[in-house]
């Protein structure tokens, strides 16, 4: 149920973001969704990619520093209060959310949100016990029509 996310570390200056994107494009690898965060000195581009191992190799060959992190994709009712309900279930299990970002597509009346937890396995158990759907690799990539 966990998904591999690539984190690419970039200098925080003009022109650095296009390098990894171009390398992936030239290798025919599609980015399903991403998040970009920054500090004064560097940025972190977090990517969900179907062919993550191939993408990691392509990015490293292009000179990028890449880390693989396990994240969890969760279906969230796309309505007022939907996210609050999921967050309450996570908080009840005393699991910390390190960061989260929305996926670029919907699944019917559900949004897909990527979460990085301090305890991904515990989070999956807690969410499933509350009836919250955790989306695995196959389901996620099928929905993205890869």
Image (cartoon, grey):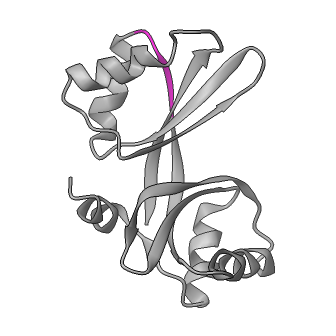
Q: Is residue 136 above or below residue 92?
A: above
Q: Main secondary structure of the magenta part?
A: strand
In this view, the residue farthest toward the front is: 80
Question: Which residue is painted at 60% across and 80% down in the image?
Answer: 127
Percent position of residue 107, x then y: 37, 73
What is the quadrant of residue 143 in the picture? bottom left
Number of marks drawn: 0
Residue shown at 76%/24% (left/top)?
39
Is 2 drawn above or below residue 69 in the view shown?
A: below
The residue lying toward the viewer, choosing from 11 and 82, is 82
Locate residue 54: give its quadrant.
Answer: top left
The answer to whether 53 is drawn above or below residue 104 in the figure is above
| Place of residue 102 in the rendered image (x, y in percent of width and height, measured from the top left) | 54, 57
The residue depicted at 52 percent of the width and 12 percent of the height is: 16
- Report the span colored magenta: 63-67
For the N terminus, the image quarter is bottom left
Nearest the eye: 98 or 37: 37
Q: For residue 36, which quarter of the picture?
A: top right
Residue 91 at x, y percent in the picture: 79, 75
Q: Locate residue 10, reporting x and y percent.
A: 58, 17
């Amino acid at each position: 149920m966990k998904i591999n996310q690539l984190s690419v570390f970039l200098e925080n200056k003009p022109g650095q973001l296009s390098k990894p994107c171009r390398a992936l494009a030239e290798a025919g690898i599609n980015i399903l969704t991403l998040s970009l965060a920054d500090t004064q000195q560097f940025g972190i581009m977090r990517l969900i990619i179907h062919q993550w191992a191939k993408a990691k190799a392509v990015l490293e060959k292009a000179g990028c520093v890449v880390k693989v992190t396990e994240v969890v994709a969760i279906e969230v009712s796309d309505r007022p209060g939907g996210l609050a309900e999921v967050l309450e279930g996570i908080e009840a299990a005393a699991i910390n959310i390190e960061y989260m970002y929305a996926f670029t597509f919907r699944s019917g009346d559900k949004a897909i949100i990527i979460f990085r937890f301090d305890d991904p396995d515990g989070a999956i158990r807690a969410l499933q016990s509350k009836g919250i759907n955790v989306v695995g690799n196959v389901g996620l990539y099928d929905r993205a029509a890869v």
